[in-house]
């Protein structure tokens, strides 16, 4: 009896997590969960957690672990009957341990992309703030320059996508990601992909997931995401 499939995708800013998550969700029918999108939804809904999270994001900071965990883990409990891929969580060891006590992951994808490539990509990245949809002038440009394909609303660039901000973000990512990567390596579920182009990495991710994800239509067992935190 095929079981549900739960995975996380990790990588430095600009490594292609959002781009590849979208492809995985479409190709394998997984529910794509994005911590950033979830925070934006809470901010837009003016929830207590959203209001609190906003005070950190406005300063370019990560949302504190206890806020993030309280935001996300109840959401995962609603997903007991679904296979999912999470982008953007966990970002710290505390978050990874909270997730670990709540759900057992089947697989973690870690993207290892060179600094120069990240810098180039982020300098060309444009975002539709309300939806989080992502464009790149060189890789996937909008139909109309500066406009979101769906809403037609203006696209923006994040200040922290600028090269001078990237160095600090990258150093911070490496510091916080290392213990998480070591944890998942020790659990034997980490798969690292290196390269400079998503289109060249994608076939390897696609073939790995094709061997790991239960076939469509096979019966899926319910797996708890109990409130372990
Ligand atoms: N030139 C180029 N751009 C790419 C490639 N893959 C993704 N991009 C673009 O690079 C930028 C970063 O990709 P994202 O998917 O947003 O990366 P991310 O890891 O989600 O980034 P963060 O949200 O900052 O953590 C976006 O503008 C993408 O459209 C690629 O192979 N080549
Ligand atoms: N797991 C997490 N822990 C703490 N803060 C998080 C988080 N996931 C997202 N955030 C906060 C900090 C991010 O800058 C912001 C937006 O997240 P995002 O959409 O993934 O964009 P980015 O990571 O490129 O900034 O939300």
Image (cartoon, grey):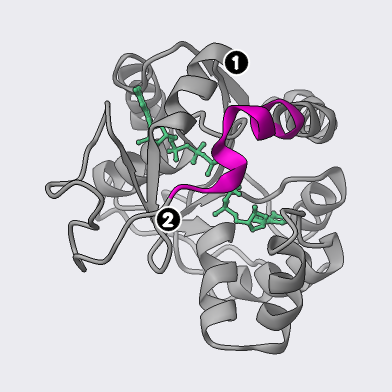
Q: Mark 1 or 2 closer to N-term?
A: 2
- The chief SS type of the magenta part is helix
Q: Assess whether residue 80 is covered by the magenta stretch.
A: no
Visible in this render: residue 169?
yes
**Of residues 27 and 198, the one drawn nearer to the viewer in this rendering:** 198
Percent across and percent down for residue 93 are: 85, 43
Q: Position of residue 210 (x, y in %)?
A: 33, 30
Q: Residue 32 carries which label?
A: 2
Image point 70% across, 28% down: which residue? 170
Neighbour class for label 1 at 10 Å: few (<14), some, many (≥20)? some
Image quarter where ligand 1 lies? top left
What span is colored magenta in the figure?
157-169
Q: Does the magenta stretch include residue 161?
A: yes
Q: Position of residue 25 (x, y in %)?
A: 34, 48
Cα separation, mark 1 vs mark 2, equals 26 Å
Q: Is residue 109 visible?
A: no
Instruction: Name the residue tied to disc 1.
Output: 115
Q: State the residue at coordinates (54%, 17%).
A: 113
Q: In which quarter of the image is residue 185?
A: top right
């Amino acid at each position: 009896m095929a079981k549900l499939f739960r995975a996380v995708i990790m990588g430095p800013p600009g490594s292609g997590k959002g781009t590849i998550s979208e492809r995985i969700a479409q190709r394998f029918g997984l529910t794509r969960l994005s911590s950033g999108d979830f925070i934006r939804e809470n901010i837009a809904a003016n929830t207590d957690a959203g209001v609190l999270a906003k005070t950190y994001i406005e300063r370019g900071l990560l949302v504190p672990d206890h806020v993030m965990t309280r935001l996300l883990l109840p959401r995962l409990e609603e997903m007991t009957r679904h296979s999912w891929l999470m982008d953007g969580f966990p970002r710290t060891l505390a978050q990874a341990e909270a997730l670990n006590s709540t759900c057992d992951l089947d697989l973690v994808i870690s993207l290892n992309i060179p600094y120069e490539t990240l810098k180039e990509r982020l300098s060309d990245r444009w975002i539709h703030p309300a939806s989080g949809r992502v464009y790149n002038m060189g890789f996937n440009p909008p139909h109309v320059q500066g406009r979101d394909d769906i809403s037609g609303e203006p696209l923006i660039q994040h200040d922290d996508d600028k090269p001078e901000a990237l160095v600090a973000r990258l150093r911070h990512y490496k510091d916080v990601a290392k213990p998480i990567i070591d944890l998942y390596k020790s659990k034997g579920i980490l798969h690292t992909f290196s390269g400079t182009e998503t289109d060249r990495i994608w076939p390897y991710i696609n073939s790995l997931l094709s061997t790991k994800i239960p076939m469509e239509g096979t019966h899926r067992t319910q797996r708890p995401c109990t409130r372990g935190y």
